Image: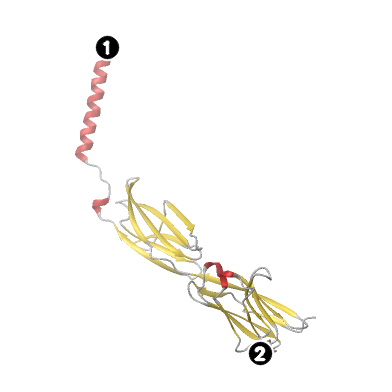
Amino acid sequence: TAQFKVRGPERPVAASLGGEAVLSCHLSPSMSAENMEVRWFRGKFSSVVHLYRGGKDQYGLQMVEYQGRTELLKDDITNGRVFLRIHNIRPSDNGQYTCYFQSSVSYEEALLELRVAGLGSAPAISMEGHQDGGVQVVCQSSGWYPQPEAVWRDHQGQRLPSVSEKTSQEAGGLFQTETAIVLTEESNRKVSCHIRNPRLNQETESVISIAELFFPRVNAWMVSVWVSVALLVTVIAVASFCFWRQ
């Protein structure tokens, strides 16, 4: 029968990319953990994030990706409370952690979750040429975590449908997104691209206003010329047919 319980935070711990996170857990009832083993791991018992044993930190079993980035705060360890500080937060740090205490007669553990989030670059908007009688506009942004949401809006804030959306994950685990829209002279000339992080409920935006001269136009004089040519060709064809029949 366990002589103590391990308690962690009731809610997920939030952390920003590049910043630091502090994960806490404590013994219940309160007792000293100075002579216990305190192990933080992910998934498997051997996947060590940080290990305290024999009264000092042990780094020999620590996973490579956490080396030089962890620090066990032991100011309150005599009351059974410890804090793990993780520096330079990365996308790979996102997920569940286990806090494990072991005494000479018993052991217990608690599960907690770290939620990593980060804002990416300001949206970059560019015109990619004419399409479907309008101008195709593309919005791009990178450096997001987790996967962001991209939305086009008109000058009144109303959502506009996009013609394409593409999101990909970069080598470092960050996300980049690209969305496109076709604007016509009759619909919208001024629009904004909004890239939102759903976890942080924060967004960045950029605005573009397209001048009238960029929209494709039909030249009335050229239209009349082509219509006249088409009629002339038709008349000649009919006349030729009649002459041949005669």
Q: Secondary structure at mark 2?
A: helix
Q: Choose between 123 and 226: the one closer to the eye.
A: 123
* Residue at (38, 58) in percent of width and height: 139
Mark 1 or mark 2: name the one nearer the start of the chain.
Answer: 2
**Residue 126 image offset from top left, x and y in percent:** 33, 56
- Spatial separation of the CA atoms under disc 1 and disc 2: 111 Å
Residue 244 bears which disc, if any? 1
The residue lying toward the viewer, choosing from 111 and 55, is 55
Q: Quadrant of residue 245?
A: top left
Crowd band around label 1 with a 10 angstrom C-alpha radius: few (<14), some (14–19), many (20+): few
Image spot of residue 114 (x, y percent): 57, 73
Label 1 sits on a secondary structure element that is: helix
Q: Please identify the residue farthest to the top as the structure is shown.
A: 246
Which numbered disc, 1 or 2, marks the residue closer to the eye? 2
The amino acid sitting under disc 2 is Asn
Name the image quarter holding the C terminus. Answer: top left
Please state which of residues 238 and 88 is positioned toward the viewer in this rendering: 88
Specify the amino acid type for callout 1.
Trp
Task: Give the percent coordinates (x, y) of residue 228.
Answer: 21, 30
The location of residue 62, given as percent across then percent down, is 62, 73
Toward the viewer: 153 or 131?
131
Q: What residue sits 43% from the left and 66% below the top?
A: 120
Q: How many marks?
A: 2
Depicted 46 relative to depicted 246: above or below:
below
Residue at the front extreme of this rendering: 60
Q: Is residue 164 left or right of residue 59?
A: left
The residue singled out by tag 2 in the image is 79
Q: Quadrant of the N terminus?
A: bottom right
Tell me if 227 is positioned left or right of 77 in this view: left
Up-down: is 237 above or below 98? above
